Amino acid sequence: MTAAAMLKAWTGAALAAPVAWLASVVNVPLKSWQRATGTGGMAAFFLAPNMAIFGIFVLVPLVINFFYSATSGTAYFLQDRTYVGLEQYQRLLDCGSYLDPATCREDLFWKAVHNTGLFVVVQVALMTIVSIATALILNREIVGRSFWRAVFFFPVLLSPVVTGLIWRWILQRQGLLNLIVHDMGGEPYNWLTDRFWAFAAAVSVSVWAHMGFYTLILLAGLQAIPRDLYEAAEMDGTKPARIFWRITLPLLMPNLLVVIVLALIRAVQIFDEVYVLTGGGPGTSTLYLTQYIYEIGFASLLRNPGLASAASILMGLVLVVLTLLQLQVGRRGERKGARE
Amino acid sequence: MTKTRTWLAAISVSLLASTSAFAGDVRIMWYSDGVEGDVIQDLLNRFMKDNPDIHVTLDNVAYKVIQEQLPIQLEAGQGPDIARVTNIKELAQHWLDLRPLLADPKYWDDNFGDTLDWMRPDGSKAITGFMTQLTLTGGFANKTLFEQAGVAMPGDKATWDDWVNAAAQVAKSQQLPAAFAIDRSGHRISGANISYGANYIGPDGTPAKVDDGTKAFVGKLVDWTAKGLMLKDTWVSAAGSTYRAAADDFVNAQIPFYYSGSWQVANLSTKIGDSFDWVATGSPCGTAGCSGVKGGAALVAIKYTKNPKDVAKVMDYLAREDVVKEFSERTLFLPAHKGVIEKGGLKWVSTDKNVGPALDKFVKAASETLPAADALPPWKWANAYYAALVTRVSQVMAGELTLDEAWAKIDQDIADKVAEAK
């Protein structure tokens, strides 16, 4: 036996001994548990640690948040706060017209709702289109395909704060873009103080930052489509556009629905990169719901934790409704596909 | 059995050590704008050498931690033993009354008496800490740019209009993006508002509605922004009460006039170096005076400390006249110690020829503040007023609100904050 093999055997034995000891210790109570509760009980046993973490870090804060939303005051601890029932919700929903934030008591909340709605519609649509296009291109036999896949996925690995900063340095008044514009003889422009361009930047940067992830999901879907369908279509002389609409898109639909649901949820929650990029400006034109909640809950000198909690509960409800709606659409699509 | 007991005892001791402070341990939460972290560490090292039974740990944190995390720790009855803070009045219920613990409370009353009210609840006689620096809002001008443009710098009693007009000529001549900028902060424009006759405090001590003084200056500011005279980026490119300084634009010679405050002196000196000459201008005048607003950072003792006597010893040392003088000279901060100010002769530690005159200018301007401005630092609603101002005025600048709508929203925001606190 060589020295390396001996070392490997000793290491194996050294590692196996404590594991075996641990197994013998755990075995007795586990066997009794299984006898008492059956296989269902064993599933519960193994799920318990995860459920405990989920409970402590998700469910409990959610419940506490409900209580906060029914209180007022500047104190952070529940026992020091005054119970006001639904007052915070009434304050948020007190509007002359929901279509005009200026008529609302909490105009900044409604401004954030409107901005978020517009952002979600434009960003999710653009994200879906760009991701499909990228996935279709990366699914073809192109030179350096693996390299390009890595290039498109790379922004996903960046911290949102880094993403926001990079693009801020590019788009700010003395940024890289204006330097290029100036060198080409153009007039530099203050992109981030213009409402339209600030919004366009927020949408584009978030698409750039996250499309790699969605492209990957769609790419997996594309590769699962049987090749013989395409070969048959080509033999029939079907045009590429018709192949896309009749074969690719229907068979990609389950993946596409996942992408839309995930992009939708992520878009409603948009915060970090836009906060760093535009700070919610110019004015409040890129102030989105999560930033409003953060500002009113923690950052602003006008902070109001009760109002922030109520706003986050309302936002959570919207997310739940959207997710259920998307799942319903997804199930209907699957049933329709199965019937066909 | 003995072995087991020994192990249990060791584990218990380790657990205790990790959860509670030992007698003699003092932890300071500190943030830095410039070199003051190094200076205070040096001073504390000397203290620990003379007092080996007390160990002081200086936790250097970001300013955001002081603003956002410290209040939550304090609400939980946790936190450091001492902290350097700027939100002094609003959190005053968490500060420790050092009066019974100090070696000579009269020394504190005599030397810090003017600012003790800033950091204790209304009506209290507690001594909770001292101002590590006194700040005053004020302007800076790029002397080199004015000279290159051949524009004379406005004099001592020049108005805001004089400064903006002169700076506009410089900006035009030197092809700069704007004439001036003011930090995005309600505190920063309050001196100017008061110079135009504003008074934020109502007769009963609660916030007054936006008055003609505020309307006069803010109206001008919005107009200057619309005309491109004030740098749009600083105020318009953020939402809410987010703070934005325009110091980098001044450092990069993008604006000839910059309104901020005395705490920028060290920063400007470090970053500008000998690139150009700059001067402190004091606060331009309005119709009622030429006022800035005082403020600053305080070092306060936290009432949840386990070692109040040691904390008092550290505070006594840091408040000593010679220590305050050295701290001010090395950090280029204006001292709040009456004895140090009256004796004068501060030898600012800087080779930059612009620094000494700039600090002297701020010391002089500190005597020109109006009573309405002096009333703001110890007023508990000041921050709420500042936040409402900056949030709504920047919306006007971005074209989302009219000025009249903004006045109504500012009054509503402040009223909501007052109601929420009741």
Image: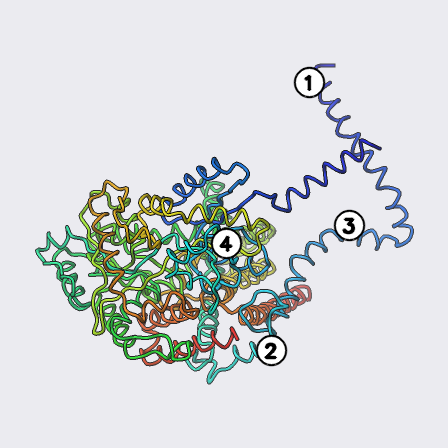
Instruction: Say what secondary structure mark 4 lies in.
Output: strand
Give the residue at mark 4: B301
Q: Nearer the viewer, mark 4 or mark 2?
A: 4
User: Compared to B287, does B78 lie above or below?
Assistant: above
- Residue B117: name its quadrant: bottom left
Instruction: Say what secondary structure mark 2 lies in.
Output: loop
Residue nearest the observer in this picture, A218 or A74: A74
Q: Amino acid at mark 2?
A: Val
Give the residue at mark 2: A84
Whether residues under marks 4 and 2 lie with C-beta atoms below 8 angstroms apart, the answer is: no
Q: Are marks 3 and 1 on the same chain?
A: yes
Viewport quadrant of the N terminus of chain B: top right
Q: Mark 3 and mark 1: span between their CA atoms?
A: 37 Å
Q: Mark 3 and mark 2: span between their CA atoms?
A: 41 Å
- Residue A87: name its quadrant: bottom right
Q: Residue at x 39, y 55 (%)?
A: B131
Give the residue at mark 1: A4
Residue nearest the observer in this picture, B119 or A152: B119
Q: Amino acid at mark 3?
A: Phe
